[in-house]
């Protein structure tokens, strides 16, 4: 199956995160929005996304599509990479997705966790999410997200 590789290369811009179209001809202007970069707040307090592809490396070496999903989520919720756990050993849990780089833990307060879990659920297809653990035993201070082994349809940063 070589379809996956070619699909990655022409990953289209996701309609949900695509910025609103600028006036005709404005695309050739020199980055008209850069001067406003100080106020990167969206309508719901979310960070404005640039529409660029998300980085594929990070979070301790998780799978590339998991890193991309992680960077998308921390951009949306204004989190730091240091607040997210990725690859880690879980000796007590042989079924954990952490050792194989298919899971992320977002350390959050309750309000952020509620919003992040709801957002992740809403965009699970794009992010390639398998399941989410939040507000269940051992998951009151972090949102655990397990990802499918193959990428979702993709989100930008
Ligand atoms: Zn976890």
Image (tube, grey):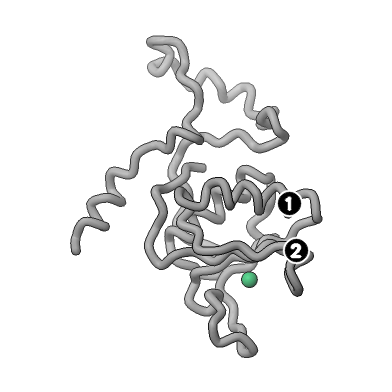
Q: In which quadrant will I find the N terminus? A: bottom left
**Disc number at residue 114?**
1
Judge by depth and name the residue closer to the eye, 41 or 148.
148
Residue drawn 61% across and 45% down?
A: 75
Name which of mark 2 and mark 1 comes first in the sequence: 1
Badge 1 local density, few (<14 within 10 Å), some, or many (20+)? Answer: some
**Disc number at residue 135?**
2
Residue 47 location, quadrant: top right
- Residue 91 in the image: x percent, y percent? 61, 89
Q: Please tell me whether residue 123 is drawn above or below residue 60 in the rendered image.
A: above
Report whether 46 appears left or right of 59.
Answer: right
Residue drawn 19% across and 60% down?
A: 2
> How many labels, in total?
2
How far apart in space, not on screen, are marks 2 and 1 (Cα)?
9 Å
Judge by depth and name the residue closer to the eye, 59 or 1.
1
Q: Please tell me whether residue 9 is drawn above or below residue 35 in the rendered image.
A: below
Badge 2 local density, few (<14 within 10 Å), some, or many (20+)? Answer: some
- Quarter of the rendered image showing ligand 1: bottom right
- Residue 105 in the image: x percent, y percent? 64, 65
Residue furthest bottom in the image: 91
- Secondary structure beneath label 2: loop
- Secondary structure beneath label 1: helix
Report whether 69 appears left or right of 106.
Answer: left
- Residue 21 in the image: x percent, y percent? 46, 19
Report if the CB atoms under discs 2 and 1 are less than 8 Å apart.
yes
Residue 93 location, quadrant: bottom right
Residue drawn 45% across and 39% down?
A: 52
Judge by depth and name the residue closer to the eye, 147 or 38.
147
Residue 110 location, quadrant: bottom right
Residue drawn 42% across and 48% down?
A: 154
Report whether 6 appears left or right of 89.
Answer: left
Residue furthest left in the image: 2
């Amino acid at each position: 199956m070589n379809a996956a590789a070619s699909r990655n290369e022409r990953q289209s811009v996701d309609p949900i995160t695509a910025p609103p179209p600028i006036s005709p001809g404005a695309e050739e202007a020199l980055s008209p929005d850069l001067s406003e970069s100080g106020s990167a707040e969206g309508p719901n307090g979310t960070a404005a996304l640039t529409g660029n592809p998300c980085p594929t490396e990070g979070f301790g070496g998780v799978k590339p599509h998991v890193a991309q999903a992680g960077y998308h989520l921390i951009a949306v919720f204004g989190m730091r990479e240091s607040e997210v756990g990725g690859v880690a050993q879980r000796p007590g849990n042989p079924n954990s997705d952490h050792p194989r780089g298919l899971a992320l833990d977002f350390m959050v307060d309750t309000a952020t966790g509620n919003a992040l879990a709801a957002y992740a659920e809403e965009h699970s297809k794009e992010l390639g999410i398998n399941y989410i653990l939040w507000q269940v035993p051992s998951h009151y201070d972090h949102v655990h997200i397990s990802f499918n082994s193959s990428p979702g349809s993709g989100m930008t940063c």
